[in-house]
Amino acid sequence: MFGDGTPAVVVGGELSGLGVARSLWRENVKVYVVAARRGPANYSRSCRTILAGSLHGRPLVDALLGLARRIGDGAVLLLTDEMAVDAVSRYRDELTRAYRFFLPSPDTVALLAQKQFFQDFAERNGFAVPRSVVVEKHEDLDRLGALQLPLIVKPTAKAVIHSGQAERIGKFETLDDAIAFCARMLPIAAKLIAQEWIPGPDSNIYFCLFYRGRDGKILSIFTGKKILSDPPELGTTVICRAAPEAQHVLEPVTNAFADRIDFKGMGSIEFKRDAQGRFVMIEPTVGRADWQEEIATLCGVNVPFAAYRDELGLAPVPIGRVRDDIAWRASFLKPWPKRECRPRTRVYDGFWRWGDPLPAVQHYMIDALSRHALRPLLERAGFG
């Protein structure tokens, strides 16, 4: 049942957008999702979906302005797509007449999208980050030898990744392989950053999801940890849970980072625990919800709803006990690592809900079958 108050508009109809829509829907907020193509949110009863030509640049802005003419000005705008953050930031003067949203300054949005700036800022301000080298020209390749292997190499700007021009990330065990990759990618990406790999499994990766409000304070924050990524070590979160054991360390660091850079709105910071037990900052998420945002809501910390209320000038909702017996899984096709099993943990599938089943039907019975994603299950059942 939709509420009768100010609606929210969520940009992005994939799993993260579905999680944000469900987080708001459970608080009786009327939700519209703007998506570039049919995805799980299209089939959810938690929202109404509008298809746009693109979630990037001017096409997204035109779609949002068109939606505002239909539903009225003043809806709260929440983003789940990285390039949508860039578009909304660049066209914020137009969009602020139609929507309520809160982002860092245009310069901060642009700079935090550059991995080199985040690295430089963190080092200058005393935050622990992996040792790195920026590669802008062929002569810089000689500097990679100063880093300890293995190495992670990424483009510093994410636009070339989203356009499909460059690979998102590469891990290299030898210096020759890292140099060859950089030499091949430089003409495409223009600038790369090489970092020392922090050894350890996916379960050494932690994150803080948060919203920093207009009063300059973080109004909602949740600490979690990955259990499994896809692909392993380098990929998107597949399984995660609350991590109260790290909360007392990571939340003060997240607060300090947000204060130092005058962060505004929704974001997150990813950390990895190294062999000495030190938490090292990997990268921030700026101006949008994270892929696994719904884990916080399921555990009792509804970050999107905190953002919604702050945009409307309403007082924050007090946070009660944060549950640590819940896990979120993007797909039941990915098995839970045995070493991370915990008794009495309730696992929520990212797509499936008894009260909202169609996103899972669409994903598992239509999309998954068409991509042969059910093959591992059939093989385990003896039908392969």
Image (cartoon, helix red, strand yellow):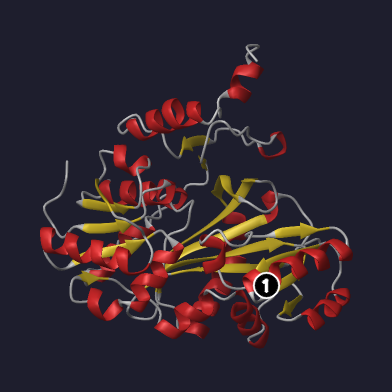
- The residue that disc 1 covers is 187
Position above or below: 333 against 167: above
Front residue of this view, candidates 264 and 138: 138
Q: Residue 172, how many percent across, how many down?
A: 81, 59
Q: Residue furthest top?
A: 382
Q: Residue at x 49, y 51 (%)?
A: 292
Q: Residue 281, how many percent across, how many down?
A: 65, 69
Image quarter for residue 249?
bottom right
Image quarter for residue 52?
bottom left
Position above or below: 232 against 339: below
Q: Which quarter of the rendered picture does the N terminus lie within?
A: top left
Q: Residue 37, how many percent across, how many down?
A: 35, 47
> Which amino acid lies under the numbered mark 1 shown in the image of this protein?
Pro
Q: Residue at x 59, y 67 (%)?
A: 250
Q: Classify mark 1: helix, strand or loop.
A: helix
Position above or below: 277 against 34: below
Image quarter for residue 341?
top right
Q: Residue at x 60, y 53 (%)?
A: 225
Asked if one can make out residue 12 in the rendered structure from this viewpoint, the answer is yes
Position above or below: 229 against 213: above
